[in-house]
Image (tube, grey):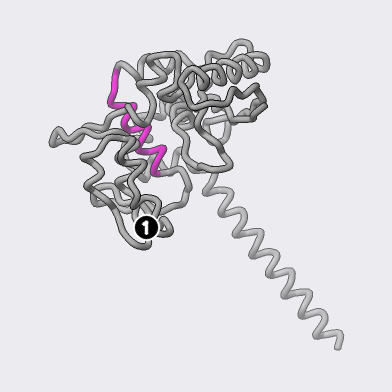
Amino acid sequence: MAQRPVFISSIKERDYVKIQDVEFEWFPGFSVKQKQRSIDSFHKSFENLYPSANILEISSKSDKKLGVALSAFNLMIKTKNNKEFSVETAFQASKVFEQGGPFIDLYEKTSKEAKKDERIKSSGKLLYFKFFSRRWELEPKTLFYDWLYVNALSTNNELSKQVIEYDAFTDIEFNPQKSINCQAKSVALYVSLYKLNLLNKALNSVEDFKEIVFQNEKIDEEKREVEEKELKTDQLSLFDEIINEK
């Protein structure tokens, strides 16, 4: 048995995506057939919990053409000067490490080549991302990936029209114990923003995207700062009382 998350588009959820962990039978092996057996088991377990949901696997192992096309390995970004590369390639090429990066030559590589480039693994700690001339910090954790993916999907009219027919998404290769960013989560986010009529506003600028998508993370951070300040004040007050007693 295995457990993986399903990302559900939700207009009520704080971050527009509900995460539902689901346990299912895992079929070991690297073949597409074995992966699809696991996906089928995964989806059936989820449908037992949410019978009315319309679920889609987002990966190159999906049994639906739409799911394969929406894989970050296949979803393309086209620049103003007609340069084209995948979301995965852009994500890997934008990484800046302690000992190198961004490795802009990766834009000429395939998704698989970019992800498996030795420098990605041997250049030390990841410091930030640099996509063209803009620097992206590592917090909020999925900001850069989500922004990159949602932007790319929004420019593909055919895929964006089809995907809004679904409301739950999986990626059989994603393990939350090992990774942070997930294409299935980014798709669920896209669908929620579309349904809430927030998509155009969110894509107006990076600042707008961050404000809309990660507003609750900002609220939580501010709340933590207030709590820490209050705790520090309480500690100082207690210390003063002890001093005065002496």
- Residue drawn at 23 percent across, 48 percent down: 104
Image coordinates for residue 55, horizontal then vertical, percent: 52, 16
Residue 41 appears anywhere in the view: yes
Image coordinates for residue 12, horizontal then vertical, percent: 57, 27
Which segment did they paint magenta? 144-157
Position of the C terminus by quadrant: bottom right
Amino acid identity at mark 1: Ser
Q: For the residue labelled by badge 1, is the local secondary structure a helix, a strand or a loop?
A: loop
Residue named by callout 1: 123
On whether residue 149 falls in the magenta region, the answer is yes
Q: Is the magenta stretch mostly helix, strand or loop?
A: helix
- Residue drawn at 56 percent across, 39 percent down: 176
Which quarter of the figure has residue 72?
top left
Image coordinates for residue 108, horizontal then vertical, percent: 21, 40
Q: In this view, does 88 lie to the left or right of 20?
A: left
Vertical position of residue 225 compared to residue 36: above or below: below
Residue 10 appears anywhere in the view: no
The tally of labels here is 1
On whether residue 62 falls in the magenta region, the answer is no
Position of the N terminus by quadrant: top right
Vertical position of residue 209 compared to residue 61: above or below: below
Residue lying at the far bottom in this picture: please name it.
246
Which quarter of the figure has residue 3?
top right
- Residue drawn at 43 percent across, 43 percent down: 143
Image coordinates for residue 67, horizontal then vertical, percent: 41, 19
- Residue drawn at 48 percent across, 16 percent down: 166
